[in-house]
Amino acid sequence: RQNLLMSVTLSLFVFSFFSYNVWYFRGINKSPSVVGYGNDANAPQSSGSLRGGHAWISLDSQPFNKDGSASKAKNLIIVAGHSVTVSGHLEDAGVDESDWFLLDYQKGQGLPEAIKGHIQAGINEAHKDPESLLMFSGGETRAVTGPLTEGASYFHVADAMSMWPSGGNVRARTVAEEFATDSFENFMFSICRFKEVTGH
């Protein structure tokens, strides 16, 4: 009976956990250590235009880990990805299906609006909690799109649509996890990425 109860409890947890696309973990509280973010985290961003002729970032864009805000994070917010971008005009990615690589069954379902809502929800939660790290999670889920990841796509959409709140440091506390290919990996790999960034 005890084993059955444990199985049912675990099943309910897994069902409820993966029913959500934005996950929030609180209370990781150890001394942080700084871990690099690819190239030099303090290096200036290019002021040139990206694909499509639109400059989404500039020298004024908030750099990763400004003032140690990411490496000091205690809480983790995960936004699980659902698609990758395949367009250079992401300013309308919240409504235009052609900005995303969608399979036939995904079209006409309002997925761009849903994705934008997930990104915005994650940003809003991170803005409320200055000790959080926001994680856009998702890897190269479609072979035909090449080395494009869901995590990076979500970050680019937030830039292109100017979704970062003013007067905060959410962009500096946002990273991409770029290897997950399903919901379980979104969860596990994001925890590993959190450890990589914060040291705890």
Image: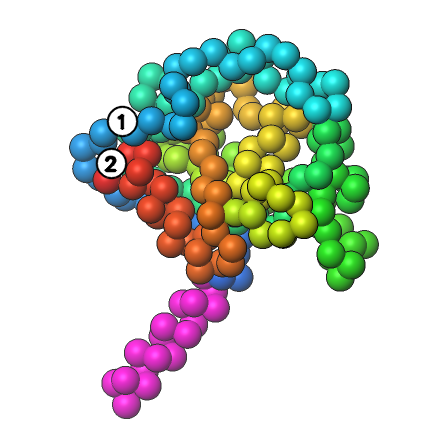
Residue occupying the point 53% across, 52% down:
21
Vertical placement of residue 158 versus 99, above or below: above
- Please say if the residues under marks 1 and 2 sit with CB atoms less than 8 Å apart: yes
- In the image, what residue type sits under mark 1? Val
Picture quadrant where residue 77 is located: top left
Picture quadrant where residue 193 is located: top left
The residue that mark 2 highlights is 199
For numbered disc 2, what is the local secondary structure? Answer: loop
Q: Which mark is residue 34?
A: 1
Percent across and percent down for residue 102 are: 73, 51
Taking 127 as reference, is 81 left or right? right
Give the colour scheme shown: rainbow
At label 2, counting other C-alpha atoms closer than 10 Å, the crowd grade (few under 14, some 14-19, many 20 or more) is: some
The residue closer to the viewer here, 178 or 110, is: 178
Question: Which span is picked out in magenta?
Answer: 1-17
Percent across and percent down for residue 55 are: 67, 16
Q: CA distance from mark 1 to mark 2?
A: 7 Å
Taking 75 as reference, is 172 left or right? right
Residue occupying the point 74% across, 18% down:
53
If the image is split into quadrants, where does the N terminus sit? bottom left
**Residue 115 visible in the current orientation:** no
